[in-house]
Image (cartoon, grey):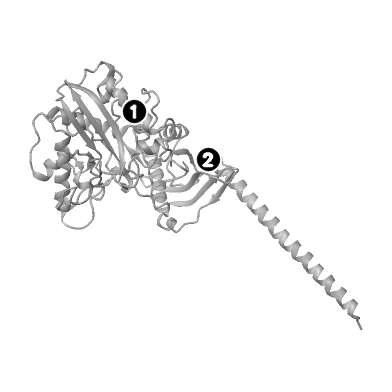
Amino acid sequence: MMTHAQLKQFIAEAVFLLIIGAAFVIGGYFISQDNANKRMQNEYHSRFDVVLDSYSYEKVKSKALNDFPEIDGVYIGLNASGAPEGYVIDLTVRSSSSKDLSMLVALDYESTRIVGLALNPNDNDNALAVSDSEMEQIKEKLIGRQIPVAIVSEEENDDDDSSDKPVLTGLKDGVYYAQRLFDDRNRYIDYVEMEVENGIITKIKWDAFSTDKTNQDRSEASLKGAYVISGLDWATQSYNLCHALLKCQDPNRLGMKSDGTTDIVEGVTCDIRPFIELSKECISYSRTGYNKDEYTRGLNIILAYLYEGDAEQLEYVRDDGHIVFSFEETPEIYTIYNDQEVSVGYMGVRQVVASIMGISLPDNYEDVSDDDDIQNSNAIVYDSSEDGLTSGGDPDDQIFTDSLDDLPMSEMQSFVVPDPEAYEQTRTVIKACNTCYKFLKEYLNWKV
């Protein structure tokens, strides 16, 4: 029979052995988990380093993936400190010829610019053929571009002899103004104000106000660090671009490329497309004397047509006089359609008012655009061959409002001219990139 002391010793030894056993089990579990994690990370590195070389990768779990059967997996690349660097999205999309393209798309975490593209190994008999040289050409066009991406039918302002173009003629003195009729993903509405004296552009301002009235203008936000882009702060880049236009007097001379950037204005790395489009619109207004006051009245006519009230009645006027409203929910108001009812660009306020009121524009309302079929200085020509009519309803009410991949033109951030010999391959890779954009838009609940 055990004594009391022996019983205590027995219990103590049993507890000790239990603790040791539990420690071995728990330690083994963590070692097993660590080994499993190492194996998984090794697999991730072997697959993803080619597009995004991060310290580690974490798989995204989201209900949003249920709406994107094309996407096989989404991963966040992390640095050694655990901070996110970018997304890697593994997906398979279908080409226009019903071929499958399986690939990896890597996007910068902050800017969602494309930082890596790679084809997945694929022994699928239905795989779209993409040669190494074609893929290199596609990567050259897309790496560094911000999603979503649209295909442009031809490059704009691609004249090597632009310096030989004459200074703009026919400008009437006055103050002219134009603003985008839709806001961007950061809820900013770009605007340009231009002053003409003696037929010469003497002052110009490019800025953007927020549809959230509590936010600062883009220039002020950039100077205070609330709005950050690569290179110099946005306010400085805007100033440099405006100064360049005052010197050359013609937006065509600023050398905008198809992706919206320029290589000839020092210190400017941002997307200058809004500035170019709105400057051209102001120039077209100057040629017919459609000044800032008339532009403001035009905005009020559009608001009254849509919402039965002017900007002041609807409380859309800021203290500085800007009308803060985005027409993004009514794109048919400002969208230009060709003879086949395909959307090909945007209208300015004067054209919108003319369309609403059923009036004709003056004979001299030809702008600086080279496209005689589009009577608008800020129109962009898109490849819209895959657009479709809205479903249901009266055919007369069916309108084209989408650009590529069911995305409205107002959301497009980059513009690419594909190589005709690799059009389908380029188009399908762009489709993959735009699918990534649509997922992130839902996953991150972007306001665009």
- Asked whether 380 or 48 is in front, the reply is 380
Does residue 7 sit above or below 39 in this rendering?
below
- Asked whether 40 or 275 is in front, the reply is 275
Residue on which the image places disc 1? 239
Q: Amino acid at mark 1?
A: Tyr
Asked whether residue 356 appears in the rendered view, the answer is yes
Quadrant in the picture for residue 266: top left
Q: Would residue 245 appear left or right of 100 to someone viewing this image?
A: left
Does residue 12 sit above or below 349 in this rendering?
below
Q: Residue at x 26, y 26 (%)?
A: 251
Please state the horizontal and vertical placement of residue 169, each as a whole percent of the image: 17, 21
Please state the horizontal and vertical placement of residue 408, each as a whole percent of the image: 29, 46
Secondary structure beneath label 1: helix
Does residue 232 sit above or below 343 in this rendering?
above
Secondary structure beneath label 2: loop
Please state the horizontal and vertical placement of residue 164, each as a whole percent of the image: 25, 15
Q: Quadrant of the N terminus?
A: bottom right
Of circles 2 and 1, which is in front? Answer: 1
Characterize the local packing of mark 2: few (<14), some (14-19) or many (20 or more) Cα atoms within 10 angstroms.
many
Residue on which the image places disc 2? 52
Label 2 vs 1, first from the N-terminus: 2
3D distance between C-alphas at marks 2 and 1: 34 Å
Q: Amino acid at mark 2?
A: Leu
List the single residue furthest toward the front: 319
Q: Residue at x 61, y 48 (%)?
A: 41
Q: Would residue 211 appear left or right of 13 to someone viewing this image?
A: left
Asked whether residue 370 appears in the rendered view, the answer is no
